[in-house]
Image (spheres, helix red, strand yellow):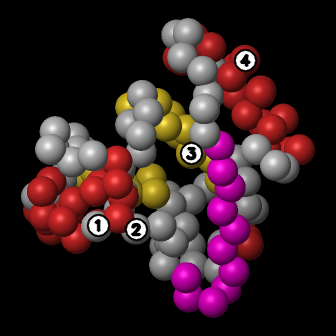
Amino acid sequence: LASGILLQISEEFQTKLAPILRGKRLVQAWAYKYLKNGAMGIRPHADEGAITVNCWLTPDEDNFDPDSGGLRIYLAETPPDFDFVAANHDFRRLMAAIGGDDAPFVDVPHRENRCIVFQS
């Protein structure tokens, strides 16, 4: 956590989300910035942890494509034979294992100051 603001946000999440975290502690935090260069974002992967928190801070008017910028959450668990490396370095294998194009999912659209909390 090299960034002071990221550290502050992490500490505040730890305090505000205490009822959800139920004694678990935050061990990873990162931030992403995408520029208007066609970057596709983060490929499907599996977070290592019990709970994931995703937040969007970008103002809605600065999202150059309102139909994008959100998060797709797949409603399938990572197969037990996948370790963290396999689940995060071979997204095609991961997608095939959870059902490929037929895998059920929920799309959460980008909205300014939106946070979602879900089981990793």
Disc nearer the start of the sequence (3/2): 2
Q: Is residue 23 above or below residue 14?
A: above
Where is the C terminus found, in terms of image quarters?
top left
Q: Which residue is mark 3?
A: 54
Are the residues at dot 3 and dot 2 in contact (C-beta closer than 8 Å)?
Answer: no
Residue appearing at x 34%, y 47% in the figure:
84
For marks 1 and 3, give the CA distance: 20 Å
Rate crowding at label 2 as few (under 14), some (14 to 19) or many (20 or more) other CA atoms within 10 Å.
few
- Was residue 57 drawn as part of the magenta stretch in this picture? no
Q: Position of residue 46 (x, y in %)?
A: 35, 49
For marks 2 and 1, give the CA distance: 7 Å
Residue appearing at x 54%, y 17% in the figure:
24
Disc nearer the start of the sequence (1/4): 4
- Which residue range is magenta in the image? 29-39
Q: Please name whichever residue, 88 or 111, is drawn nearer the observer in this view of the structure.
A: 88
Label 2: which secondary element: loop
The mark closer to the camera, 3 or 2, is: 2
Q: Identify the amino acid type marked 4.
A: Thr
Could you say which disc has been placed on residue 91 in the image?
A: 1
How would you classify the magenta stretch by its main secondary structure? loop
Disc nearer the start of the sequence (1/3): 3
For marks 3 and 2, give the CA distance: 15 Å
Q: Which residue is mark 2?
A: 43
Residue appearing at x 84%, y 35% in the figure:
8
For marks 1 and 4, give the CA distance: 33 Å
The mark closer to the camera, 1 or 3, is: 1
For marks 4 and 2, give the CA distance: 30 Å
Q: Position of residue 36 (x, y in %)?
A: 67, 85
Q: Is residue 95 above or below residue 25?
A: below
Q: Which residue is mark 4?
A: 15
Are the residues at dot 2 and dot 1 in contact (C-beta closer than 8 Å)?
Answer: yes
